[in-house]
Amino acid sequence: MTTDAQILSALRSCNEGGVSGAELSHKLGISRAAVWARIEELRTLGYDIEATPHLGYRLLNSPDTLHADDLLARLGKTKVIGRDVRVFQETTSTNDVIEKLARDNVPEGVVVFAESQSKGRGRLGRKWFSPSRKGLWFSILLRPKLRPQETTQLTVAAATGLRRAIERATGLKAKIKWPNDILLSGKKSAGILTELTAELDRVKHIILGIGVDVNLSAADLPAELRKTATSLRIETGKAVSRAELAVHILRELDHDYTRICSGKFESVANEWEEQCETIGHPVAIQIGERRFHGRAESLDDDGALLLRTQYGQLERITGGDVTVVG
Ligand code: BT5
């Protein structure tokens, strides 16, 4: 943990009381003057840190910016996801940044957040609207020991963890729409983009890109998204701390990633099916030029959707756009 992360972590753990400069200097193994310099730096980043002779330093407020050290300090120890966290002010797409890290052999679990993306993308080259500081736009590098055809398991695990985190952080009822949307009141509030690099029978790495609409107001949404998209702020009626939400999400994703890596996909799939608005319903699925009609039955062992078509056959669906009919 960096010095700043250790200072923030110490300030957070002392609740109402404060922590003295002497204590911090002892704990961190640096001089009191160096502690003071770091506190000043944190203040310039927007952390409201009070210094009083009796109580020492107290953290009164954190800014609504993403700060890698702060995220690491709040997150604590995880198994894989979030062992390394990096924050960019702006990038094309956080998936592009992770792609570069993957080529440099950076270990799995690294998370890259961007305050804004100039070329945020969805599936099939669609655009992902990523306005500055209004959402969580981030990607994770993973190197699971899965066969390429099993990687839909990862999108399923990501949707399960993301849904749970949004619900726990906000108290809202969130639902999954196959394969990659999280819905609030029937509207899209988050999306997942899974990009895969594989050899014939082996996954080299997977980039899990996630976009969550956190503090967008209705007016922030472009006209073409107003009917289909929503944000946590629109649904709760109040601003949501993005850093706190990010920590919830990374913890839940780490939990579900560990579950599938230890062969427990079935338990993740069961939770997914319980929370999915698509299962059990008549649906239309558009895959490129082809359109399927039928009833969404369940997930198979690899995470593909099993669709009972209008002609009675069972089709295995791994991509496309689903609409619940009727
Ligand atoms: C997705 O694609 O839902 C995947 C979105 C993944 C975004 C993250 S952000 C971090 C990382 N870096 C990236 O560049 N991407 C990932 P898809 O199912 O294809 O949905 C795309 C469609 O959602 C668009 O065509 C719009 O209709 C709609 N859309 C675009 N921006 C949106 C937003 N902010 N909120 C809700 N809907 C949106």
Image: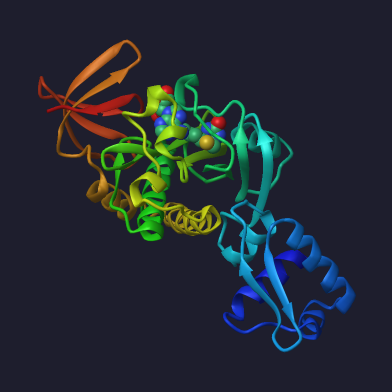
Q: Is residue 167 left or right of residue 127?
A: left
User: Which residue appears at 64% of the width and 65% of the height?
Assistant: 73
User: Which residue appears at 45% of the width and 25% of the height?
Assistant: 123
Q: Quadrant of residue 62?
A: bottom right
Q: Is residue 256 left or right of residue 3?
A: left
Which residue ends up furthest to the top in the rendered image? 289
User: Which residue appears at 32% of the width and 10% of the height?
Assistant: 289
| In the depicted structure, whether residue 54 falls above or below residue 154 | below
Of residue 51 and residue 1, the one placed in the foreground of this image is 51
Visible in this render: residue 202? no
Quadrant field for ligand 1: top left
| In the depicted structure, whether residue 193 falls above or below residue 78 | above
Q: Is residue 163 left or right of residue 305?
A: right
Judging from the image, the colouring scheme is rainbow
Residue 228 on image: x %, y %: 32, 30
Of residue 301 and residue 77, the one placed in the foreground of this image is 77
Of residue 63 and residue 290, the one placed in the foreground of this image is 63
Residue 142 on image: x %, y %: 56, 45
Residue 230 on image: x %, y %: 37, 38
Visible in this render: residue 213? yes
Residue 25 on image: x %, y %: 82, 80
Of residue 50 and residue 280, the one placed in the foreground of this image is 50
| Quadrant for the C terminus in the image | top left
Question: How many marks are shown on the rendered structure?
Answer: 0
User: Which residue appears at 53% of the width and 28% of the height?
Assistant: 200
| In the depicted structure, whether residue 93 falls above or below residue 277 | above
Which residue ends up furthest to the bottom in the rendered image? 54
| Quadrant for the N terminus in the image | bottom right
